[in-house]
Image (cartoon, rainbow, N blue to C red):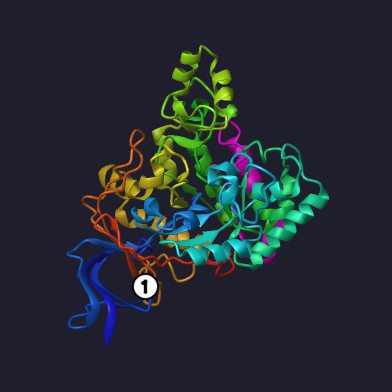
């Protein structure tokens, strides 16, 4: 028979964390058809990998690409890193189901402008993704803040029982249509007034579907352990797996506390499905949050609606220029975006290297000066942290961005190089792979990504899009409580 594609002589990193081996991989009808010595077998496209590494396409479990997968379906920041699937709807904010009354409330504005929110139901969103045919596959969470926006006149209070019922119905409808679960962003002003009971009432719906609960904790600063307890309390109540989003120890007073934080999540994971994602940088980024304004470390302003000319400057310099206290300058800049240099490198390494941790970029695709994680997170884990720093073997780095991620989010038949699995594949050079995006010059494609296939279709090669796109919407494929380990 003739296969659609054979990739010969590849170092196979299969996504399970197992030792690598050299083999040929054949693909037909979008799926992996054979692995081994394919000798004289023929294929329409026959490629010699020459000993480069072949891994399952990377799964970015933490993104805010909700509207970008439709508006910019090339998804160059992600496909250029070898990412073949993105999970959208994190941190309590999702593009659907959403009905806006005006401008999107902070931080929903990270996803786009009012005109970009045109999905009143999850089914509308799902159809729009499939119609756009993005270069990457898309799976979606439903945001708590998005639901609050739909049912509440103001977000600085707890929801009433009627409002919670309205949110539950929308969440149920989305889960019936393939959403992965519920996300919260409890640290943000738009959700911090919600009580644990409000979130529990919503999370209960997950139990009927085997959905997952992901959370940007109520705080990542001094109170982080209590915030983690709240997350696990919600998960246990809902009998749902818990994923702590972008786990970190934020703020100078918190440096070094990753030991306690890891203890907490490992302890929780013994009795209940629990895990986390992490981006490989010691600076965070989001909208400019007055609660995080401090002189303890640098804060870089990336955009400002009233003062776009201040993008790229430090908040302290802007304050000096305006002759204002830091806080007053921050207020004058809002709405705005910021990068906070507020983490300790040792904490980042301890969290990233833990076996419960998946890689997620948390990239902000609509920021004019995006945190470099948008373009560099995955190559940085492979090149900088695995190869150069030696934080973990390459097989483990790949597991954190493929097999583990597919298991946690129930992405059926993906995340591993295995016969029968979808041919989401990335061919890369372990010797040269490198993130080139940095804080000064963050819009840069990584080095060392040789070729990327999505559902068997060659989508990126030689640092360029091929013009072919083959991503699709991925509904929750199974009960996510199963397969957690
Ligand atoms: Zn977040």
Question: Magenta segment: does it hold 219?
Answer: yes
Left or right for 459, reference 93 = left
**Residue 197, position in %: x, y?**
75, 47
Quadrant in the rendering for residue 40 = bottom left
Q: Is residue 329 above or below residue 193?
A: above
Task: List the residue tagged with mark 1.
Answer: 418
Between 218 and 166, the one lying in front of the other is 166
Q: Quadrant of ligand 1?
A: top right
Q: Is residue 188 above or below residue 272?
A: above
Q: Is residue 229 above or below residue 141?
A: above
- The residue positioned 41% from the left and 29% from the top of the image is 312
**Residue 306, position in %: x, y?**
54, 28
**Residue 51, position in %: x, y?**
19, 63
Range of residues picked out in magenta: 204-231
- The residue positioned 33% from the left and 46% from the top of the image is 380
Secondary structure under the numbered disc 1 in the rendered image: loop
């Amino acid at each position: 028979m003739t296969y659609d594609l054979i990739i010969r002589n590849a170092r196979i990193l299969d996504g399970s964390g197992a030792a690598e081996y050299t083999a040929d991989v054949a693909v037909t009808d979008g799926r992996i058809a054979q692995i081994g010595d394919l000798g004289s077998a023929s294929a329409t496209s026959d490629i010699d990998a020459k000993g480069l590494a072949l891994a399952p396409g990377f799964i970015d479990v933490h993104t805010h690409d909700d509207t970008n997968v439709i508006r910019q379906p090339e998804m160059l920041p992600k496909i250029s890193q070898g990412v073949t699937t993105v999970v959208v709807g994190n941190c309590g904010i999702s593009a659907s189901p959403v009905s806006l009354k005006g401008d999107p409330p902070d931080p929903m504005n990270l996803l786009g402008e009012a005109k970009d929110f045109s999905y009143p139901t999850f089914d509308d969103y799902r159809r729009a993704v499939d119609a756009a045919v993005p270069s990457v596959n898309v799976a979606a969470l439903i945001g708590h803040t998005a639901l609050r926006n739909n049912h509440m006149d103001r977000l600085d209070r707890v929801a009433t029982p009627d409002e919670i019922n309205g949110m539950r119905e929308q969440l149920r409808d989305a889960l019936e249509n393939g959403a992965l679960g519920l996300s919260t962003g409890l640290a943000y002003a738009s959700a911090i007034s919600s009580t644990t009971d409000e979130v529990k009432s919503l999370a209960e719906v997950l139990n009927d579907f085997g959905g997952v609960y992901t959370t940007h904790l109520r705080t990542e600063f001094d109170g982080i352990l209590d915030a983690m307890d709240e997350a696990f309390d919600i998960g246990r109540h809902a009998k749902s797996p818990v994923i702590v989003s972008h786990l970190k120890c934020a703020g100078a007073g918190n440096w070094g506390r990753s030991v306690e934080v890891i203890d907490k999540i490992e302890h929780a994971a013994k009795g209940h499905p629990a895990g986390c994602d992490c981006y490989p940088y010691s600076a965070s980024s989001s909208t400019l949050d007055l609660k995080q304004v401090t002189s303890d470390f640098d804060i870089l302003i990336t955009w400002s609606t009233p003062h776009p000319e201040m993008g790229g400057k430090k908040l302290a310099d802007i304050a000096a220029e305006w002759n204002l206290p830091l806080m007053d300058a921050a207020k004058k800049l809002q709405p705005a975006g910021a990068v906070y240099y507020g983490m300790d490198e040792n904490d980042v390494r301890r969290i990233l290297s833990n076996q419960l941790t998946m890689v997620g970029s948390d990239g902000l695709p609509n920021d004019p000066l995006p945190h470099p994680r948008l373009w560099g997170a995955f190559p940085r884990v492979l090149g900088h942290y695995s190869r150069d720093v030696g934080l973990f073997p390459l097989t483990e780095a790949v597991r954190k961005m493929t097999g583990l991620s597919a298991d946690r989010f129930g992405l059926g038949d993906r995340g591993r190089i295995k016969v029968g699995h979808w041919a989401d594949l990335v061919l890369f050079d372990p010797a040269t792979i490198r993130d080139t995006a940095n804080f000064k010059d963050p819009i840069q494609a990584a080095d060392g990504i040789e070729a990327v296939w999505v559902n068997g279709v060659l989508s990126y090669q030689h640092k360029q899009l091929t013009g072919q796109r083959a991503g699709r919407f991925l509904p929750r494929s199974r009960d996510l409580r199963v397969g957690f380990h």
